[in-house]
Image: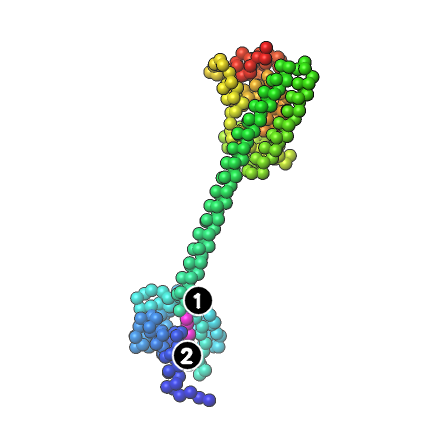
């Protein structure tokens, strides 16, 4: 069954897709109405012109070699390329091409995919914004978790430590009364349980934190703590609570100008003077026992003190602890 030339012309003219026919010399021999309307040309402006009139030279897939392959029978199907409009703008197209039956040329059919490209770009932008918002949300959540963790550790943890020290002070003052001693032991045991719960909650809320300002000894302590499946929080985040609390509770004033000790060493000294063991000091200050021992050695070296009793006297003289007499 054969169609008349007029029928073929009507079909081609009514196509929504662009149609371009090229002769064997890559010149445009025919275009349909959709091609002219899309690219802004009149038909006679394209007929007889080289295919690169509408196909940019950089589209090398359909250069001389590519055209010859199609002319030899190879097909191009749904390839994304750009057509060049009369106003020099690029129009994204989905292009297919095949040789004519008489092999005297090539026919190319292409569909404008501008809207699809816009939709794809909008989708990419939306995904980018979504990723950004998700990252912001995760960052905000992590900051809030960390804030809660530090607040829990600093506020409640410090209060528990002070309470424990006060109970120990009462226990030492009234140590001869067995009943009171047992009560104090029970209270200290309960405080230890609550402290451990606070520590666990703080660890669950926030990952281990080590600030870059921390000394090498703190870095080693952090490594040891994490190696033992523990949680390490920088002493800088904990604050200088022990020393500050003692200062606030003292009636007299002390001079720190002549004190050769660091803030952390003063914290350790105070706890030593309170009769706290190295292990308990390590737990209270969230450092390793080895770090406590290093601080203890540094304190004794700086103060030129050989015995623990003299450390207690020094702490009393400086006002780090109050006399129980």
Residue at x 44% of width, y 55% of height: 126
Badge 2 density bin: few <14, some 14–19, many ≥20, Cα 10 Å = many
In which quadrant of the rendered view does residue 174 lie?
A: top right
* 46 in relation to 127, above or below: below
SS assignment for the magenta stretch, majority? strand
Q: Which residue is mark 1?
A: 80
Q: Judge from the rendering whether residue 109 lies leftward or rightward of residue 176; answer left or right.
A: left
Q: Which residue is mark 2?
A: 105
Residue at x 42% of width, y 58% of height: 122
Residue at x 59% of width, y 26% of height: 284
Indicate the secondary structure of the residue bearing disc 1.
Answer: strand
User: Is residue 201 found inside the magenta-colored segment of the image?
Assistant: no
Q: In the rendered structure, which segment of residues is drawn in magenta?
A: 105-111
* 135 in relation to 319, above or below: below
Residue nearest the viewer, comparing 83 with 29: 83
Residue at x 58% of width, y 20% of height: 166
**Would you say residue 266 is visible in this rendering?**
yes
Residue 130, position as x, y percentages in the image: 46, 52
Badge 1 density bin: few <14, some 14–19, many ≥20, Cα 10 Å = some
* Tally of marks: 2
């Amino acid at each position: 069954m054969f169609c008349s030339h007029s029928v073929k012309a009507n079909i081609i003219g009514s196509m929504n897709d662009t149609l371009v026919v090229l002769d064997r010399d890559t010149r445009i021999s025919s275009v349909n109405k959709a091609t002219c309307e899309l690219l802004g040309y009149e038909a006679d402006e394209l007929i007889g012109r080289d295919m690169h009139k509408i196909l940019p030279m950089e589209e090398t897939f359909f250069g001389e070699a590519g055209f010859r392959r199609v002319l030899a029978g190879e097909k191009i199907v749904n390839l994304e390329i750009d057509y060049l409009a009369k106003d020099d703008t690029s129009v994204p197209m989905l292009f297919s091409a095949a040789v004519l039956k008489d092999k005297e040329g090539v026919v190319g059919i292409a569909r404008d995919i501008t809207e699809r490209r816009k939709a794809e770009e909008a989708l990419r932008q939306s995904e980018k914004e979504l990723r950004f918002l998700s990252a912001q949300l995760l960052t905000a959540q992590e900051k809030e978790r960390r804030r809660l963790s530090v607040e829990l550790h600093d506020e409640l943890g410090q209060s528990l430590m002070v309470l424990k020290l006060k109970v120990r002070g009462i226990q030492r003052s009234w140590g001869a009364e067995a009943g009171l001693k047992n009560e104090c032991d029970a209270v200290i045991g309960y405080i230890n349980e609550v402290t451990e719960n606070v520590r666990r909650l703080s660890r669950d809320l926030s990952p281990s934190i080590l600030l870059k300002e921390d000394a090498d000894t703190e870095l080693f302590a952090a490594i040891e703590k994490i190696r033992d499946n523990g949680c390490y929080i920088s002493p800088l985040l904990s604050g200088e609570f022990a020393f500050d609390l003692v200062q606030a509770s003292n009636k007299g004033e002390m001079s720190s100008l002549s004190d050769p000790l660091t803030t952390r060493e003063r914290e350790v000294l105070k706890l030593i003077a309170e009769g706290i063991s190295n292990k308990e000091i390590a737990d209270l200050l969230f450092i390793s026992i080895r770090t406590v021992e290093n601080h203890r050695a540094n304190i004794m070296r700086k103060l030129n003190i050989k015995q623990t009793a003299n450390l207690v006297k020094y702490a009393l003289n400086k006002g780090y602890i109050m006399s129980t007499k």
